[in-house]
Amino acid sequence: MATRSNLKTILFDLDGTLVDTAPDLSETLNRLLIRHQQPTRSPESIRPYVSRGTTGMLGFAFGVTEEEPEFVDLRKEFLDIYENRLCHHSQLFDGMDNVLDFIEDTNLSWGVVTNKPDFLTQPLMQELSLDKRCACIVSGDTLPQRKPDPSPMLHAAELTGSQADECVFVGDAKRDIEAGNRAGMHTLIALYGYLEENDKPDHWRADGSISKPTELIDWIQNSSTHV
């Protein structure tokens, strides 16, 4: 079993872990609802579904599943709206800038593994001036597989020059923790993220959890040495 003393790389889920994208995604969903003459939803009610992407948000707002014919058209409309308002209100979670500074100052690397498609991930990272700082960006369509498959995690480790057991993956969804565990990485749950009411993070078999980003600094510091 890997020990935390060989930690080299911190990998983050994007939406709900590294960046608070819920404000722009909520506004996008409400614009789509208005377009279809449906009542809007409060940002607070939308927030828990953000981590499940368009499938979760459209299911919540329109009651459709991926199997239904109208889903494809709704998803395209949603993405067309969102692409033009990617970073109006989205920003790093409070304290995450200090976390990234700490990671870089201690000669560790960090990267992103997300199920968000690349045509949205890359511009968002650029808007936030994060694309040049991170060691890798693995999007939902970088590989044929997506989380909870471990392949994107292993690809990220390879891109950063790390072994899987030298990485910790931080995420706010069950599939994040499952993917990290299956890849042989350390895993941490971002409890400040977009968890749903019925989620049971205690059952996800993560190595730990953080209730705010800066607690990740403490977790890293408790790793005695870095390679």
Image: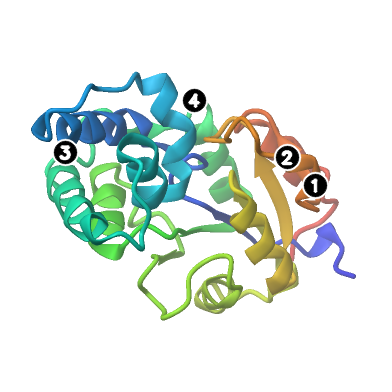
Picture quadrant of residue 148: bottom right
| Marks 4/3: CA–CA distance | 21 Å
Which label number is shown at residue 85?
3
Q: Nearer the viewer, residue 19 or 200?
A: 200
Q: Circles 1 and 2: CB distance less than 8 Å?
A: yes
| SS of the residue under disc 4 | loop
Q: Nearer the viewer, residue 56 or 217?
A: 56
Quadrant containing the N terminus in the rendered view: bottom right
Mark 2 or mark 4, whichever is nearer to me: 2
Task: Give residue 203's mark.
Answer: 1
Q: Is residue 51 left or right of residue 24?
A: right
Callout 3 amino acid? Arg
> In the rendered structure, which amino acid carries the disc numbered 4?
Asp
The alpha-carbon separation of the residues under discs 3 and 1 comes to 36 Å
Indicate the position of residue 109 as horizontal and vertical percent values.
Answer: 56, 59
Q: CA distance from mark 3 to mark 2?
A: 32 Å
Of the image marks 1 and 4, the number of the one nearer the N terminus: 4
Image height check: is 216 above or below 168?
Answer: above
User: In the displayed structure, would residue 177 be above or below residue 48?
Assistant: below
Instruction: Report how far apart the C-alphas of labels 1 and 4 lie in the structure.
Output: 27 Å
Q: Spatial distance from mark 2 to mark 4, Cα to Cα?
A: 24 Å
Residue type marked 1:
His
Q: Quadrant of residue 3?
A: bottom right
In percent of width and height, residue 38 lies at 19, 27
Q: Which residue is mark 2?
A: 200
- Marks 1 and 4 close (CB-CB < 8 Å): no
Residue that label 4 marks? 94
**Are the residues flagged by discs 3 and 2 in contact, CB closer than 8 Å?**
no
> What is the quadrant of the C terminus in the image?
bottom right
